[in-house]
Structure formats: C-alpha cells, structure tokens
Amino acid sequence: MYAALWRMLPGPVVVRILILLVVAAAIVASLFIWVFPWVLPLVTPLDATVQQ
C-alpha cells in the first residue's frame, strides 16, 4: 500500500517527502481540531492517583 502511494506522488524524492510531511501534518491537525474533541465526551478517563 505504501509503495503504491509513493509511486502515485509526483516529482522527485524531495518533493514526495515534502508532500507526505504536509499530508501527515494535516491529518494530525484535523485529529486535534475535530476528532479528539468529539471523542472526549464519549470516553471517560479514570480518576487514577498514585499513592505512596
């Protein structure tokens, strides 16, 4: 799958790496902006404390 993605990208290796970095940054940003806030009310974190 990754090889097919790599062959689909245009340009030399440097341009392909830049395109993949921009796409990865966009995916991470969209996760933090839309997905994680949407999931937060559905997942209740445990109130765990460390005692000595």
Image: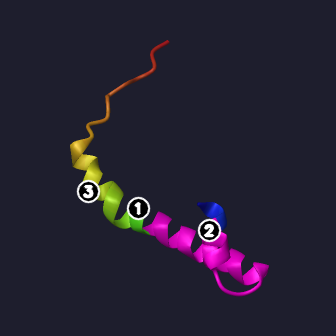
Q: Residues within 10 Å of mark 3 (few under 14, many from 20)?
A: few
- Closest to the camera, between mark 1 and mark 2, is 2
Q: Is residue 28 magenta?
A: yes
Residue closest to the far bottom: 11
User: Residue at image x 77%, y 84%?
Assistant: 12
Looking at the image, residue 24 sits to the left or right of residue 50; the answer is right
Tag 3 residue: 38
Is label 3 in a helix, a strand or a loop?
helix
User: Residue at image x 70%, y 75%?
Assistant: 17
Q: Which residue type carries mark 3?
A: Trp
User: Residue at image x 49%, y 72%?
Assistant: 26
| Residue 52 at x, y percent in the picture | 50, 12
Looking at the image, residue 3 sits to the left or right of residue 27; the answer is right
Q: Main secondary structure of the magenta part?
A: helix
Q: Nearer the viewer, residue 3 or 44?
A: 3
Disc 1 and disc 2: Cα gap in Å? Answer: 28 Å
Q: Which residue type carries mark 2?
A: Ala
The residue stretch that appears in magenta: 4-29
Q: Quadrant of the N terminus?
A: bottom right
Task: Determine whether 10 is above or below 25 in the image.
Answer: below
Q: Which residue type carries mark 1?
A: Phe
